[in-house]
Image (cartoon, grey):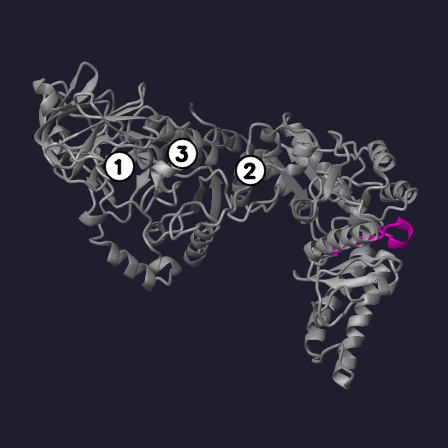
Amino acid sequence: MSGGVDSAVAAARLVDEGHEVVGVHLALSRMPGTLRTGSRGCCTIEDSMDAQRAAKKLGIPFYVWDFSERFKIDVVDDFVAEYQAGRTPNPCMRCNERIKFAALLERALALGFDAVGTGHYASITKDEDDNLELHRSLAMAKDQSYVLGVLTQEQLSHALFPLGATASKDLVRREAAERGLTVANKPDSYDICFIPEGDTREWLRDFVPSSPGKIVDQQGTELGEHDGHVGFTIGQRKGLRLGRPAADGKPRYVLEIRPKTSEVVVGPEAALQITQLSGERYSWCGRAPERPEEFFDCEVQVRAHGDTVPAQAAIVEAELVIKLKEPLYGVAPGQTAVIYLGTRVLGQTTIDQTTSAEVAVV
Amino acid sequence: MQALNGALEQLGNPSSVHGHGQNTRAILEDARDQVAHAVGANRSEIVFTSGGTEANNQAIKGIYWAQNRKNKARKVIVTAATEHHALLDPIDWLVEHEGAEVINVAVGSSGMLDLEDLEQILSSRSEEIALVSLMWVNNETGVITDIVRVTELAKRYGIPVHSDAIAAIGHVPVDFAESGLTAMSISGHKVGAPIGVGALVVARDFSPVSLLHGGGQERGLRSGTMNYPLATSLGAACQEAVSDRVERQSRLKQLRDLIETEIVRAIPSAVVTARDTDRVDHNAHLIFPGTQSDNLLFLLDQEGVSVSAGSACQAGVLGASHVLVAMGHPEELASACLRITLGHTTTASDAERFIEAIIKIHPGALVASQSTQSAN
C-alpha cells in the first residue's frame, strides 16, 4: 500500500472478496522518514501514514517493510549505471521485477502469505488449459500491463490485481470516497518515485561525475557542447542548446549517445526511425509461444504510455528480435519492449540494439 | 484512572485564588507529594512536564545554558551512545546550533558503562564540562548504571549530573536525595499513567534556564496552566509502581529467567544481551542471528504476542538498534533483536505462550529475512 488511492481500493476489494489481507507499505527510500517536498514522492511519512489510515479504515493489520537496501542496489544503482552506459532504463519495470514481485513476494511467501495484491491496472486470466495470462486493464488510459511485462508464470500465480476490471480511474476514486478512504482525492503520482522533482538529468548530477563532451552531427561535425552525456535520451529534442539551426532548418534530435567519448550525436527526425529491436534479456509472461524461433505476428509497445505497432517477433540466436511493420521513433537501448497478442502480454525484452532504416541502408 | 477521573470532575485553574482554583491546586500539590515521595525527592523539586522527552530537553538544554552562562568555556556534554534519542537529539541540537561538544563514555559489549573512562574524561576536561547525563536504566537492554558512583566522580569537579530515570522508576530503588543528582527525568506512561505527563526532578540548589516562558509556573521552569488531572494520575502511578516493587520484581525475574533459558535451549543461536551484567529483572533482550526484528515481530503478532524491538522511524521502518551498535554489535545483529518487557499483569502462562510462539516462528523468520538481502 503506497499511500495512494489505487492500492487502498485494491486492498478494500480483496477484503470484500474474503481474503485475509495484511497491508504492507514498502519503505524504499534510503532516507526513510523524510517529508515529501512536492505532491509526489514515495515512502515518505505522509504516504506511510496515508496507507496506515486506509488499512485502519479497512480493519486490516498494517506493516512497513524496509526494502531500501535492495531498492538502492537493484533499482537505483541499476538506473544510474544504465544512464552512464548511455542507455535509458525503466526503473518501475526493475522495481516490479526485483522488488515487488521478487523480494517482497519471497518474504511474503516465507511469512505464510499466498499472494501479493497491488493496485496496478492489469488483469490476470486463465486460458482453457488453466495457464495464467496477463492482460491489459479495462481502463485503457490507466493500463499498466506494460510495467508488469517482466512477470513470469510463477510470479503471476502469486499476484492479484483487483483493479484490472475497472473501466476508469474516476470509478476507483469514487469508490474510495464511498468507502470513506481519505486518499480518494490524492493526486496521481507521475515520474520516477525516487526523483521527486521530476528532473532526471539534474538528479543524476549527484551520482555521476560530470563528463563534458561534444554534440556532433552524423558526419562528426561539432555543433556544440554539453556538460555531461548522462541523462540524455534517444529522441530528445529539448535542452540541446545548439546555437545554430540545422542547414535544412528542421529540429534536431538525439540519435546516439557514445559514453566512451562522451559524444552526443544529433540529427533529423527521420534518422530516429527504428525498424527492428533486439535484446538478450527477455522473458515470457505466462505461457511461451510454441515455436518461438519462428517469427510470429504480435504488437509491440516500448513505453509505459506509448502506442503499439504491429510487428513480428522470434528468438534468434538467444535474442528476442522484433521486426516492426511500422517504424517507431526514438527508441533507446535500455528501454523495455513488451510484446502483446491483442490484449495479452506475451513477453518482454530489455532493448540492447535498435536498427534504424537509415543505418540499415548505410 | 481513578485519580484521573476524580480530578477531571474538578474545574478550575490551579493558579486562581477562587475556591475552584484552590481545589485543583490541592489536587496538584498532593500529586507533587506523591511523586516526590516515590522518588525520594523534596516536593519543591518536582516540575511537571508533558512527558519524558520534554523533561530531557529541559534538563539538557536548561543545565547546559545555565552552566555556559556562568562560564563560557563549559561547552562539553558527557553522555553515552546507548542513551535514548529523547536525550541524544537535544544534545545533537546543542552541538549543531550552540557549538557544544559531546564526549561519549565508553560502553562495553556487555552494555556496561566504563566508569574508569568517565573518570578519565572528567579529570582531563573538568574545566570545560557543562554537565554529565547518563541514564539510570537502559530502556532496551535493561542494564543499570551505578548513578551514585557517577555523581561521586562528577562532584569532585563540581559538575552537575542529570539522569534519565524513565526506565528505572518502579524497577530499581530510586532515591533522588541519595543519588547526588542535579536533575532526573520521569515519564508517566512508563509507570502506568496516561501518555502526556512526566516530570523533571530538579535539585533545589540548581536553576536551569527555562525552555518555556509565560506565567512562570513550576519554579519558572514550566510556564503554562498546570495539568492537574494528568499530574494526579502520575502521582498515583508513581506511588503504585514503587509500593510493591520488591515482590513484583522477584516474581518477574523468575519468569524472565525462564524465558531466557528456554529460548536459548530451543534456539541455540539466540544470544541473551547483557546476561551477566547488572540489569533490571523484568526485561529480557535477545538477539536472533540471521533474522530481522520486523519479521520476528510480524510472525509473533500473528501468534497474538506483542513484543518490541528498537524504535521505528516516523515512516514506520524498524532500524538497527543504536544501543546494540553502541555496544559494538554489527548492524545485522543490531536489527535482529527482541526486547521482552514483563509487567505486573504478566503470568507464567503468558511466558510459556511466548516461549512456544518464538520457537514456532523462528524458522520462518530466518527464511523471510533472507529476502531483504540483495540477490546481487
Q: Secondary structure at mark 1?
A: loop
Q: Which residues are magenta?
A: B174-186
Residue B170 in sight in this render: no
Could you say which quadrant of the image residue B197 lies in?
bottom right
Q: Are marks 3 and 1 on the same chain?
A: yes
Q: Is residue B137 left or right of residue A38?
A: right
Query: Around disc 1, counting alpha carbons within 10 Å, would you say few (fewer than 14), some (14 to 19), or many (20 or more)?
Result: few
Residue A89 is one of the magenta-drawn residues? no
Q: Nearer the viewer, residue B244 or B165?
A: B165
Q: Is residue A179 left or right of residue B66?
A: left
Residues at badges 3 and 1 in contact (C-beta under 8 Å)? Answer: no
Q: Chain of mark 3?
A: A
Q: Is residue A196 left or right of residue A123?
A: right
Residue B325 in sight in this render: yes
Residue B179 is one of the magenta-drawn residues? yes
The residue pinned by badge 3 equals: A205
Query: Around disc 3, counting alpha carbons within 10 Å, would you say few (fewer than 14), some (14 to 19), or many (20 or more)?
Result: few
Q: Secondary structure at mark 3?
A: loop
